[in-house]
Image (cartoon, rainbow, N blue to C red):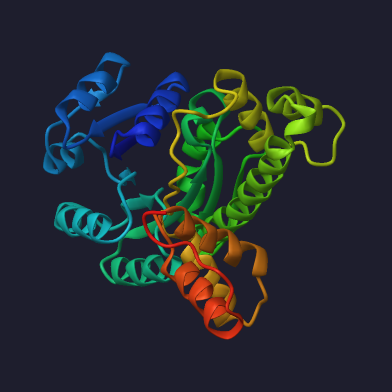
Amino acid sequence: MELGMIGLGKMGGNMTERLLRGGHRVVAFDRNPETVKAAVAGGATGVDSLEALVGQLTSPRAIWMMVPAGAPIDSTIAALQPLLQSGDILIDGGNSLYKDTQARAARLKDHGLQYVDAGTSGGIWGLQEGYCLMVGGEQEAVTTIEPLLRTLAPEGGYAHVGPSGAGHYTKMVHNGIEYGLMQAYAEGFELLKTKQEFALDLHQIAELWMHGSVVRSWLLELAARMFEVEPDLETIKGWVADSGEGRWTVQAAIDQDVPAPVITLALMQRFVSRQDESFAAKVLAGLRNQFGGHSVKRAGE
């Protein structure tokens, strides 16, 4: 099968390579010509514009977009829409808000275009291990691109989970769960690290827990690799970003009256990590001083 791939970053580039290995024809575009050259070296057909990409594909076309959520995906769709024909399929493999996906699908349907949302998990390991694909959209469109999905995913790693928006909603909740899991591991390993009298080897323990323990997981395997390379994480600053999905999951919990305290607190901890000094902590210290005369540490002490 042939596919147009827009966006050749860490995910898009590796997905392109996996598709090429699977025997598919990929027409590749990125604003960075160097990533296009790399894709061409791997067997892709490289182009320098969206117009050229569309022109290289046979209708009904399938075009996969691996670009950031929000304005970048909207501008990409706006540029592509006049170039496409009825029956062509656009696939959003990024982490778009599912409500935006539903709106885009409805607009494009009015123009005879099909829209598929493919929540994609696998990170930089997807090239080797395959990608978990949570796919939303109309059955006809999903069936058409199924050969691509089965090449990208490992055995059992692809499912059509529902109508437009369902794929991105499922991926959103997936990432919210990921926040909670990562936070639990982080807190646990800090407890191990700070019990200095035992001088615990974090790499050894992470490896140990990978064999028969109920807390074993791929994230724990990655932790073991991390501690093997850098046992004390000396070069890593404890500043943790969030790319939006955690916030959207918490908002969905509020909207749906679902208690989600672990995911919510995991998100809050990421905010805490970005503070050089907490104003809230200053308020707490000041209030203890006011009502109880408790001592406070002054700036510069």
163 or 216: nearer the viewer: 216
Q: Quadrant of residue 9?
A: top left
The total of numbered circles placed on residues is 0
Residue 94 is situated, as x and y percent measured from the top left of the image, at: 39, 50
Does residue 251 appear in the picture of this structure? Answer: no
Quadrant in which the C terminus is drawn: bottom left
Q: Quadrant of residue 42?
A: top left
Residue 158 is situated, as x and y percent measured from the top left of the image, at: 60, 43
Q: Residue at x 31, y 17 (%)?
A: 43
Q: Residue at x 20, y 20 (%)?
A: 37
Farthest right residue in view: 212
Residue 110 is situated, as x and y percent measured from the top left of the image, at: 29, 72
The answer to whether 163 appears left or right of 301 in the picture is right
Q: Residue at x 54, y 70 (%)?
A: 250
Does residue 220 appear in the picture of this structure? Answer: yes
Quadrant in which the N terminus is drawn: top left
Q: Quadrant of residue 45?
A: top left
Picture layout, residue 227 above or below residue 134: above
Q: Residue at x 57, y 28 (%)?
A: 232
285 or 105: nearer the viewer: 285
The answer to whether 283 appears left or right of 134 in the picture is left
Picture layout, residue 228 above or below residue 48: above
The answer to whether 110 appears left or right of 84 in the picture is right
Picture layout, residue 121 above or below residue 137: above
68 or 19: nearer the viewer: 68
Farthest bottom residue in view: 291
Residue 19 is situated, as x and y percent measured from the top left of the image, at: 43, 27
